[in-house]
Amino acid sequence: MTRRHVAVCPAALVALLCATGAAAPAAAQGFQSGRIVIEAVAAVTTSSAAADDPFVFLDLTTTMRVNESLDVIVRPWARRLPGGDWDALFYAAEIRYQPIDRLRIEAGIMSSPLGMGTLEMRQDRNPAVASPFYYFGPLPRFDPQADRVQVLAGGYPIGAIVSSSGSWWDVRGGVTDSTPARYRKVFASNNPAPAAQLIAGAGVTPRPGLRFGIGLAHGAYREGDDLDYYNNPAPLPDADATVFNVEGEFAVRYTRITGEWVRDRFESTTSPAITRGFYLQGVQTLTPRLFATSRITHASTPVLVGTARVQRTRSQFELSGGYRLTPDWILKGGYEASRRYGASDWDHAATVSIVWAKRWF
């Protein structure tokens, strides 16, 4: 049996992880059994480079507390891309089960267990105008066959994760159905075949406001006999990917600094392709309504040019600020400089975003 036939069954994984999990604290949801919480977010983002061709984001999260131990979360998400095309998927369709005070299990379509940026994919939680580009932008081709992988993906996988934490530590582990280095729409018809990935991570919090964490994922990213996805009469052999990340966060008074570093190792037809990416972000709260943000994002990857590989880089810098007009409305704007893979010149633009967010109980 090849790896393409190994699909992830969340129910089976829950049973497996329950048998192997250890007790540790998990955050309470904070509302009573039977209560439903709805959080809606809409945002429009544009820049001086294409002011009449904006991004539009629509995000809806519904959380229902079945009982004191079980929550059901559904989160459809859609965005309008420049040019007018729409992209839609489920960012969450999962259960969160807390059988005892110090253990949490998540199963279904869920947030990626790797990456700091996935915690700020909602536009009202993102302090900047844009997101780190490598969560959505694919890597250039490093093999004769294009695999559409990236440094780290913003899309959410199917799987199951067990997590626990103490006063100064946290751990997690489980299985997903796709490498975190590929943006995958769960219900799309052009996805690669499911391939089980082993996921693990841990963190330490030596003092309030300071945390360091690591994460690791390993599994197949290419199946040579997946002809439906590659549509290639001469497919390349099976190949695995290993994703490793380091993340950190420091908050003191009105300042918060976050960042991550990611290293991917993709097996290939010659030597392994090694890609790296990082971002570093600082947020300063100036008043209860006003904040400023700065972020630098960088990625490096081998690119196939003819029959040889050359190293290419991509960079992005953003300096922006935000103002909370009302409890429901946020206006953000600033400056962005970006340089694409292989380019020598920087592109410069002014950016603006208007965000509406509402919560109902």
Image: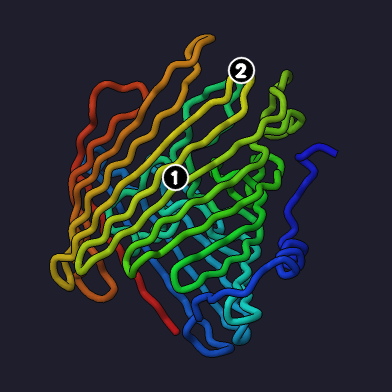
**Is the image coloured rainbow, by chain, by secondary structure, or in one colour?**
rainbow
Q: Residues within 10 Å of mark 1 (few under 14, many from 20)?
A: many
**Mark 1, residue position:** 135
Residue 342 picture location, percent across and down: 35, 21
**Residue 312 shown left or right of residue 230 in the figure:** left
Which residue appears at 42% of the width and 81% of the height? 360
Which residue appears at 63% of the width and 43% of the height? 218
**Mark 2, residue position:** 270
- Is disc 2 placed on a helix, strand or loop? loop
**Residue 14 shown left or right of residue 27 in the figure:** right
**Residue 106 shown left or right of residue 249 in the figure:** right
Furthest-left residue in this view: 286
**Residue 87, above or below 312:** below
State the residue in front, 290 or 256: 256
Alpha carbon separation for disc pair 2 and 1: 26 Å
Looking at marks 2 and 1 on the same chain, the residue that comes earlier in the sequence is marked by 1
